[in-house]
Amino acid sequence: MISLLRWLLRLLYGFRAFNEAAVDIPGPVLLLPNHVSWWDWLILGVCLGDDWRFVTSSTTAETSWIHRRMMINRRTFPVDMNSPYAVKRIAEYLRGGGRLVLFPEGRISTTGSLMKLFDGTGFLILKTRPKVITAYLRGACRLPYSRNPDRKQLFPRLSVHFSSVREAPRFDQVSATAARALLADWLRTEMLRQQFEVEMEMGPRTMPEAIAETARREPGRIVLQDVSLKEVSYRRLLMGAQLLAGEWRRRLPQNSRRVGVLLPNVNAMPVVILSLWSAGRVPAILNYSGGAGPLLACARLAGLTHVITARSFVERIHLDLEPFRGAGMQVVFLEEARDQLSSGRKLAALLRAFLPARPRPGAAAEDTAVILFTSGSEGDPKGVELTHRNLLANVRQMLSVIDVTEKDRLFNALPLFHCFGLNVGLFLPLVRGAFVFLYVSPLHYRVVPSAVYNLNCTIFFGTNTFLAGYARKAHPYDFRTVRYVFAGAEKLQESTVTRWLRQFGLRILEGYGLTECSPCLTANVPMIPRFGSAGRFLPGIEYQLERVEGVGPEGGAAAETNPEPAWHPNGAGRGVGRLLVRGPNVMRGYLNPEANTRFQALGGWYDTGDIVRVDEDGYVFVLGRLKRFAKIGGEMVSLAAVEEALAGAFPQYGLRFAVAVLVRPDEERGEQLVAVTNELKLTPAEVRAAVQARGLGNLAVPRKLKVLPELPRLGSGKLDYRQLEKLI
C-alpha cells in the first residue's frame, strides 16, 4: 500500500524525498516537520517505517468520522492536547525507544510560513533527550487543503527534505523552564535554517528565473503600480521586458555589458532591469539624489558607455546630461526606444512572455546581477557587485522569517537605487507574488500616508527620518490596514517608536544591513522582536566579533566579556566587537580596486566596519561605525550613542528636531565632540543634561554646539556626514 501511494505521489506531484536514510535510525527519536496542509501525514508517511507514529489530537479526532478515521489508527499516537498529562504520555513512549512524528507548531500554518512552536516540544527534548530530525515539506503549501491565503494548485511539485540526525544542546546551568524555552528556540532556528538551505538548493538560480517561475503560476496577477495608477500584471511585465531586451540588443554594442539606469520609482524601472538581464547586460543603478557630479563619478567607476533614462524624469529633476555626453557616454531615452517598437514585435513579445526569462545564455547564479553604489555618507561612494545568488539569498532569508503572503500589498517609497528599496521593496514581492506600489519620493510626508490608506497596503518600509515625518502629517486612521512596518538604513529612535505606537497602534520592526550584504543581515521579526535591538542574524549568515581596544558593551570603556553560552543562534556567541560576516548574500566584490583587494583578502568574510553588541539571546545592538568613535582621554566614545541620547530627549522641539555629533581635534584630550542641530533654542546645558541622563560619562558631552537651518541628508534619509563636515 505504501509503495502504491508513493508511486501515485510521484506520478501526480513529482514527489521526491531527500536524505531518507536519516529516518532509519532506532528510537528514541523525534521527527519534527513544518505543518502546512492536511496531506502532510501522507507525504511523510510514505517515507517512514511501520513503527513510526504520528502524534495527533484526540479531541480534534472527534470532530467528524473522517477526522476520526485519519487521526486514530495504528499509525497515530492520539493524546488529549488539553490535558496536562499529554506531554507526559509522549515522553514515556519516547523513553521506551519510540519513534514519533510531532508537528511542533501544533496546527496547520495559516500563512505558509513557520508559525510559533508548540510549548511542549522543548519540554519533550529536555526530559527525554531523543535524537532529533527536522523535515521541510516543500510545495505542500500549494495543495488545495492547506489553510494559507496563497493561490492553490491541483498538482504542485512536492518534496520532503530530512535533516541529518541532531543532538539537542544541553542547558545544565539554567532552570528547567529556561532550558525548555532555549530548546524551542534552538529548534526554531534549525528549522528556519533548513528551509533556507533547501530553497537555495531547489529554487531558481537567478533572479529573472525566480520571478518568471512565480509569474507562470498566475500570469494575470497585478503585481505593480505607480503614481500613474497604471496596473502591471506579470504578463505585461515580462512582455515589456522582452520588447525592450530586443531594443537593447540592437542599440547597445556587444562590449557594453554594464549599462547605467537612471530612473525613479516607477513601473518602468523593473521592466528595464528585467530587459537588461534578458539582453545579457548588467544594470548599474545610479543614485540621482546627489547631483550630476557624484552621478558622473559613479558612472565612470562602473565604466559605463550608455545610460538609460526617461526624458520626462530628466526634465523634472533638472538634470544636466551634457557632462555624461562629454565623458563619451550615450544617453538612451525610454520614450525613443518605445516609439521604435512595432506591432509585430509586441505580438512576438506577448507570446514569449510565458517562457522562462533568462539573463543570457549560460548565465549563472554567481554572475553579477546589479551594480549599486554605497551612500557615500562618510567617504567616496563604492561600486558594489551583487550576484543573482546574493540577491536571491537575501530574499529567501527574509521570506523564511517573515510571513509575507500573496495577499499582502507592499508600499515602497524608498528609492530603488538604495539596496533595501530594490531587493526587499521590489524583488522580494515580485519573487513572492505580492503586490507592490512604487512611489516616487519618500519625502512627501503628507501624500505617502494617504496613499497607503487609499491602496489598503499591509506592509510598509521606511527609515527613522521618513517614519518620523509621516507621523507628523498622517491621520491616525491612515495606516489602519498595515500589519508590518519595517525600518532600516539608520538607527530607529525611541521617540519615533513611541509616536507610532500611540498614534497608529503599530510596532516598528528594526533591521540592520549594508549594501554589500544585499542588504539585510539582521531583522526584528513579529515572532521574536526585541525593542532597541536590530534583531537576530538571518538564516545562513555567520559572524565574528573582532575585539576593539577600549570599546565596551554600550560603546564606552571596555569591560570583561561574558562567558559563551552552550548554544547560540549563529554559533559565535555574545560579546562586543567589530562585526565581520559571511554568507551567500555577501557581495561578489567592489569596483574600486583598493577596496576590493582588502575585501578579497578576507577570504569570503566582509568587514562591516560597525561595532556591535550581541546579547545572550543572539540579538544585535549596533553601537556605531568604527569611524564614528572618538578617542577622548584614551577612551572610546560612540558618536551614535550620543546622537541617540540627544535625539529623543527634547520632545518640546517637535519631530522636526535633528541632531548630529562630529569629532574635532583637541590639544588636551586628543579629540572633542561637537553637536550640530537645526534647533535655535537648544542650549549647551540641555545637551549636557540629556547625555548625562542616559548614563553616559562626561567624556561623551559635546563641548561645542553648532546650529544650521537644516542638516543635509542623503536620498535614503541618512544624515550626510560628509557634507555636514564641509558645512561645519
Image (cartoon, helix red, strand yellow):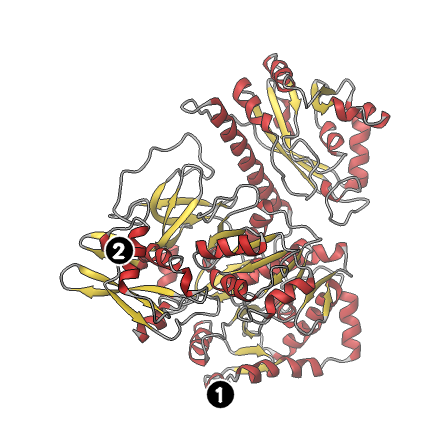
Q: Is residue 104 visible?
A: yes
Q: Earlier in the sequence, mark 1 or mark 2?
A: 1
Residue for point 39% across, 71% down:
711
Three-letter amino acid code of the residue under disc 1: Glu
Question: What residue is pinned by disc 1?
Answer: 322
Q: Is residue 408 left or right of residue 631?
A: right
x and y percentages locating residue 34 in the rendered image = 65, 35
For the view shown, which residue lies furthest in the left direction? 668
* Image quarter (top left, top right, bottom left or bottom right) of the N terminus: top right
Residue for point 40% across, 32% down:
565
Q: CA distance from mark 1 to mark 2?
A: 47 Å
Q: Is residue 147 left or right of residue 429?
A: right
Q: Is residue 403 left or right of residue 586?
A: right
Q: Are marks 1 and 2 in contact (CB under 8 Å)?
A: no
x and y percentages locating residue 222 in the rendered image = 74, 62
Mark toward the viewer: 1 or 2: 2
x and y percentages locating residue 431 in the rendered image = 65, 55
